Amino acid sequence: MITAPGVFEAVFDAHFEEIRRYIGRRLDLDVAEDLAAETFLIAFRQRDRFDSALGEVRPWLYGIATNLIGRHRRAEVRRYRAMARSGPPPDDEGHDQRIVDRLTADVRADRLAGALARLSPGERDVVLLVAYGGLTYDEVAAALKIATGTVASRLSRARTKLREVTG
């Protein structure tokens, strides 16, 4: 139970950086720190509502973060459209990783960003929770409070749309 003393601190220590990175990939890195902190503030305030019988804390945190990102959805879409015109922004990974990413990319980031901007909000959330968060279908379902079958169908539709745009 995360309401026990010290347990929430362990949850924060274990997941803050992962949630911050996920938010940073979806929104500007400048916003990621603040929204990650807000994610944990909301989680702390609602910790008595968390039911471990329904699942793990990780998807619950991703669900809170995704809801916060949803509040910034218009800015997110504008960002993807701008990236489609100008290329990818700097990321929070090291220099070596950026070089490897650029050398091994199958799809140009501008085309991918444009394709992401064209997805429905639900499809985009599923794709980015899987791609950036590394969540399983069950974890995405728990995070978004939707059925696992809905996750699979949204991801399938999104993949089709992304393939059409990116080739």
Image (cartoon, rainbow, N blue to C red):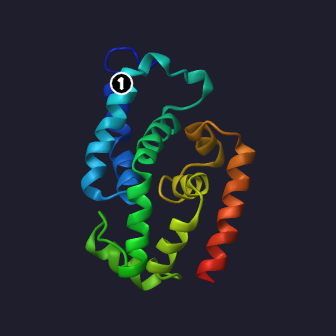
> Which residue is drawn at the image coordinates 39% and 50% (left, top)?
72
Look at 54% across and 52% down and name the residue there.
125
Question: Measured from the top left, where is residue 52 in percent x and y?
Answer: 55, 23
* Quarter where residue 99 is shown: bottom left
Percent position of residue 71, x then y: 42, 45
Query: Few, some or many C-alpha atoms within 10 Å of disc 1 (few <14, some 14-19, many ≥20)?
Result: some
Give the side of residue 127 with respect to residue 47, left or right: right
- The total number of labels drawn is 1
Q: Name the side, left or right, on which 102 lies relative to 52.
A: left
Q: State left or right for residue 78 relative to residue 138.
A: left
- Of 23 and 79, nearer the camera is 79
Going by the numbered disc 1, the residue's amino acid type is Phe
Which is more toward the observer, 10 or 85? 85
Element type where label 1 sits in the image: helix
Residue 30 percent coordinates (x, y): 24, 55
Q: Classify 108 as above or below 36.
A: below
Q: Is residue 87 shown above or below 31?
A: below
In the rendered structure, the answer to whether residue 60 lies left or right of residue 24 reads right
Given residues 30 and 44, the one toward you in this image is 30
Q: Quadrant of the C terminus?
A: bottom right
Residue 126 visible, this angle: yes
Up the image or down, 40 lies above or below 163; here it is above
The answer to whether residue 26 of the structure is visible from this angle is no
In this picture, is 128 found above or below 80?
A: above
Q: Which residue is mark 1?
A: 44
**Residue at image coords 30%, 76%:** 96
